Amino acid sequence: LVHLTIDNKPITVPAGTTILEAAEHNGIPIPKLCYLKDINEIGACRVCVVELEGKDKLIISCNNKVEEGMVIYTNSPKVRMNRRKTVELILSQHDCRCATCVKSGNCTLQKIANDLNILEVPFQQELEQTPWNKDFPLIRDSSKCIKCMRCIQVCDKIQSLNIWDVESTGSRTTVHVSKNRKIEDADCSLCGQCITHCPVGALRERDDTEKVWSALADKKKVTVVQIAPAVRAAWGEALGMKREEATVGKIVDALRKIGFDYVFDTAFSADLTIMEEGAEFLERLQNGELKDRPMFTSCCPGWIRFIKSQYPHLVPQLSSAKSPQQMFGAVMKTYFAKSIGVDPENICTVSIMPCLAKKGERNMELFYEEYAGHDVDIVLTTRELVRMIRSAHIAPSTLVDAPCDTLMQDGSGAGVIFGATGGVMEAALRSAYFLVTGKNPDADAFSVVRSNNLNHGAVCAEIPIGDTVVRAAVVSGLGNARQLIEMIERGDVHYDFVEVMACPGGCVGGGGQPIHDGQELALERGKNLYFLDKNANIRFSHENKDVLKLYEDFMGKPLSHKAHLLLHTDHNA
Ligand code: HC0
Ligand code: SF4
């Protein structure tokens, strides 16, 4: 243990602790911009400087360790003056038009500047604007970048994709797409982790809310919206609601107030996915197709983009099932359109997703009878949903629990846990067990595939189902996925079924979720989904009555010709 004083307070912390952590653990917050624990501890922003008694020069607190007897001041006149100059310099190279910035109100730079009572920017410099394709789902505004390097580090260390890099040196240092590429040519997975780790507004999603407002205003259009599992676990955070208050029923209410004609829960089509993907898995397993390599889940478009660019030879191992988002869109434009007697061309399908990659996934085309179009027309992130609720001037306290529309209303607990890492696997195992043995397992029998530590890589389990043992692996985060694939390819390990989610913790940690600078909330949000599953009326996808009715009245059975047309895709295409 090391003893020191910080701001006159005697403190004891384990050796190896940084000054910043020692202070924070003892209720003395130090402002910082670039620091991200274990990912970015490079002291680039210099905002976290502190004074060390007996030393002339200020020191950086995020990457200097405590030493016995240190006397530290985090807020002395010298520190304040230096910190203020540093922030003024950062602001001089930053587009400070906060009123038109998507991060306004949730921007760390804005908060620090406000806290330091900086009321003017003394030396605003000419800002360079790097050209950017505004149609791409991920948008970077170079005039807002503060060169904290977080995006580079998250992409390298967590996602292993190296999309970003530094260019030039000294005061001309900028961040840009690596190897001089355009973003659309850079193999970006669209996981959006760079956005959720950006302390300012330099990275954001393409805003599609105006398209939705136009569709809502168009009298000819019937608007049909679906809400992804992970959205319910996070939307309230951005509206100051407590977790238990921010129910999915209130999102339904908000979307109706905003003007949507029909509102559905993606948990319905998550159950449908399990019917298709579960049947496909058992078929491939029994046909001996998984002897060398596993079947991979196909519902995360970030993962699909990754495998296509990094391991194209593994694409045939992907399940051919479309994701729940796409399946729901296809069902809305066929089965549902027919039921309400509306031409699919007059239906606008919208989805609310925790995800950026879903904005790319929606480009997938729908081929059915005469009609070819898109399963899903517009994808909004959780953050865009929150912006729409705000634009509509809806007070969260006035929202009530409303049910989804009928016909595709049911959603099981198994469908809800899709939003957390391990959820798809667990839901699939519950139903595979039933398909093989004719009996339901205990609903919690496969909870071993859940994750409680995202730094531990893949979670693996051997699951006995009837006479066979299914070797299952679950992984989230693309760096972790890469490690697992390398092990599979070397033949060190063998699995039958592997679930991959691009975002750490699964969709709950998605790139479209509310941002809380420096806080990783995926596991906490995931627990919320497991709580909802535990308390759900039905916990098995194969017991979803509306899914069973869809098969009976329209789709036939899993893997039928119609199911193939509407619910599966060729990832090679
Ligand atoms: Fe997900 Fe999904 S679980 S990808 O993370 O599979 O976005 O929440 O909607 O489609 O259901 C995201 C979340 C979904 C899909 C589902 C899957
Ligand atoms: Fe999108 Fe979920 Fe995949 Fe992240 S894990 S890229 S949020 S589908």
Image (cartoon, rainbow, N blue to C red):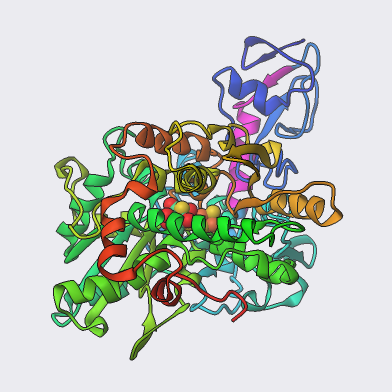
Left or right side of 426 for 176: right
Q: Judge left or right: residue 528 versus residue 4.
A: left
- Tell me if residue 476 is in the magenta stretch: no
Q: Residue at x 25, y 50 (%)?
A: 251
The boundaries of the magenta stretch are 71-89
Quadrant of res 461: top right
- Front-lying residue, 118 or 138: 138
- Residue 274 in sight here: yes
Which residue occupies the foreground of this view, 132 or 421?
Answer: 421
* Residue 527 placement, left or right of 256: right
Please tell me whether the stretch drawn in magenta is mainly helix, strand or loop. helix
**Where does the image place residue 514, in percent across and percent down from the top left?**
43, 48
Number of marks in the rendered image: 0
The residue sitting at 61% across, 54% down in the picture is 90
**Residue 173 shows in the view:** no
Residue 453, x across and y down, in percent:
62, 33
**Side of 370 relative to 486 (left or right):** left
